[in-house]
Amino acid sequence: MTERTGIEPEGKTMEHTATLGRSDLRVPRLGVGAMTWGEARGLARLHPAKTAYGGAHGREEEKRALEASLEAGVNLFDTAAMYSGGASERRVGELAQGRDVLVATKFPSGFRFRAEGFPEELEATLARLGRSTVDLYQHHFPTRRVSIPDLMEQLADAVEAGKVRAVGVSNYSAVQMRQAHAALARRGIPLASNQVEYSLLHRQPETDGVLDACRELGVTLIAYTPMAGGRLTGKYSAQNRPSGLFRRVLPIYRRKALEAIQPVTGLLTEIGDRYSKTPSQVALRWLIENPVVLPIPGAKDGNQARTNAGALAFSLTPEEVDALSQATLAWTA
């Protein structure tokens, strides 16, 4: 009997792309989160992306991240109008010019958004991106001020006008997803995705109905923060806490919390050693093994982008997937 290594035999390639939900958009099984990209100005410099995640590394490093991702077949880049006051959208648009890049972005640009402001938001995003069409346009977060059915009608209009290829939502509950899905279906347009936080250390989509709704409705779950803010990389421990002030004050980075995840990072390391992979690559692969899920880890430079893309180069056994799931049951609550 040949021992399973998790690496595909020579001459056989793994499927690295999939349809985004039931849309016509073909995407890689892994994307790139560009939240920290671009140079923010004014108050936008105080955005959590600039403090919690170390801020931008500069245009040249971001260009290397994009190029390394494309070389690995990862051409989906996720941004938002709200990130750094639009700087992230501008940088993604600038670097993507002339390249085979799929851009996923989110609206609105501020917290006072109302549905009647949608056309203006879309035109501003297209201008920042330097494009005539957004590949995936996502409503960033639901609020009581915005009627989901009314907003989906406007998104459907944008699809029919050729300005949006696929419609997604973000941070929607299962109930809100169903509302959006039903409204779009009346126009013959699928809800392609719901972007929510999901990782081995944040498994609430499994218990709050979102993952089940994605399976039922044929919607892709785009997983943001898939490495739990760096806690699944093996970089942090009770003895090596993050140096940044913002992270150090968060409860999840306190000594006891980091001690609690040591068994998880230990298992990630153990499994990774079998394939010569890092703990972060194994954590990403655990998500990718679920055909409904598409993780979008951040990449601030070429090295991070190459490391992330390495999650596509191997597979986990069902036993390894189950072992990681069992080891993180405490994070399903």
Image (tube, helix red, strand yellow):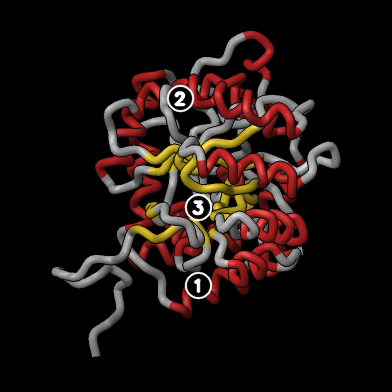
Q: Residue at x 53, y 28 (%)?
A: 36
Please report whichever mark, 3 or 2, sits nearer to the chain's N-terminal start. 2
Of residues 234 and 35, the one drawn nearer to the viewer in this rendering: 35
Quarter of the figure with residue 255: top right
Q: Nearer the viewer, mark 1 or mark 2?
A: 2
Q: Is residue 261 visible?
A: no
Q: Residue at x 35, y 49 (%)?
A: 309
Residue 321 — which label?
1
Assign the C terminus to one quadrant of the image: bottom right
Position of residue 117 relative to residue 304, above or below, is above
The amino acid marked with disc number 3 is Pro
3D distance between C-alphas at marks 1 and 3 = 16 Å
Q: Is residue 155 visible?
A: yes
Of residues 98 and 313, the one drawn nearer to the viewer in this rendering: 98
Q: The residue tagged with tag 1: helix, strand or loop?
A: helix
The total number of labels drawn is: 3
Left/right placement of residue 242 relative to residue 209 reads left
Left/right placement of residue 165 relative to residue 253 reads left
Measuring from the top left, give residue 107's x and y in whole percent: 63, 33
Of residues 177 and 162, the one drawn nearer to the viewer in this rendering: 162
The amino acid marked with disc number 1 is Val
Please report whichever mark, 1 or 2, sits nearer to the chain's N-terminal start. 2
3D distance between C-alphas at marks 3 and 2 = 22 Å
Residue 295 — which label?
3
Measuring from the top left, give residue 9's x and y in whole percent: 20, 72
| Residues under numbered marks 3 and 2 in contact, where contact means CB atoms less than 8 Å apart | no
Left/right placement of residue 50 relative to residue 284 reads right
